[in-house]
Amino acid sequence: MKDIALGAGLWAVWIGLMNAHVLGGGTNAAQGLLSQGTLESLMWIPVALSAGFCEEVAFRGYLQKQFQVITGNAGWAVLFQAIFGIGHLYEGVGQVARITMFGVLFGLLALWRKSLRPGMIAHAWSDIFGLIIFRGMR
């Protein structure tokens, strides 16, 4: 229950920052990636769940720990794993900055809790409901 509450809290921060337009907006490049219709929207749920799981394992579970061993510093490890937000460059520089900031938040949560579960919950939840939010922007 604690991990669900922490995941929900991180998701609330994510939504708050997105709605506040922190770090500017991205392009609408992601609009073309959104599902079309009910069937594709339903198929998005397992994709979002797997992204929440896999990205947290890869970035916070593996890379962050590797960077901590290499640098000997947990703070640098959190920052270094988060710069992989650059993979969202197709969405614009503002979106890269925003996703990098979220990577830092997820990294800090994983470090503090010594668990990937709250980040997995928040990540999957935000990806699932991100579809609904983006749809509202159309």
Image (cartoon, rainbow, N blue to C red):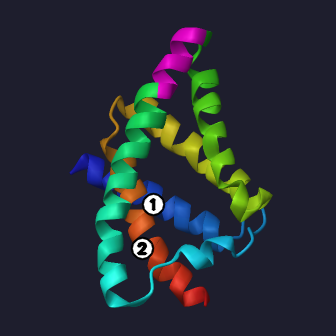
Residue 92 percent coordinates (x, y): 76, 62
**Which of the 4 image quarters holds residue 61?**
top left
Q: Amino acid at mark 2?
A: Phe
Q: Residue at x 20, y 51 (%)?
A: 1
SS of the residue under disc 2: helix
Label 2 neighbour load within 10 Å: few <14, some 14-19, many 20+: some
Q: Residue at x 64, y 31 (%)?
A: 79
Kindly identify which residue carries mark 1: 11
Magenta residue span:
63-70
CA distance separating discs 1 and 2: 10 Å
In the rendered image, the vertical position of residue 81 relative to residue 121, given as above or below: above
Q: Residue at x 47, y 64 (%)?
A: 12
Left or right of residue 17: residue 65: left
Q: Is residue 49 visible?
A: yes
The quadrant of the picture occupied by the C terminus is bottom right
Q: Amino acid at mark 1?
A: Trp
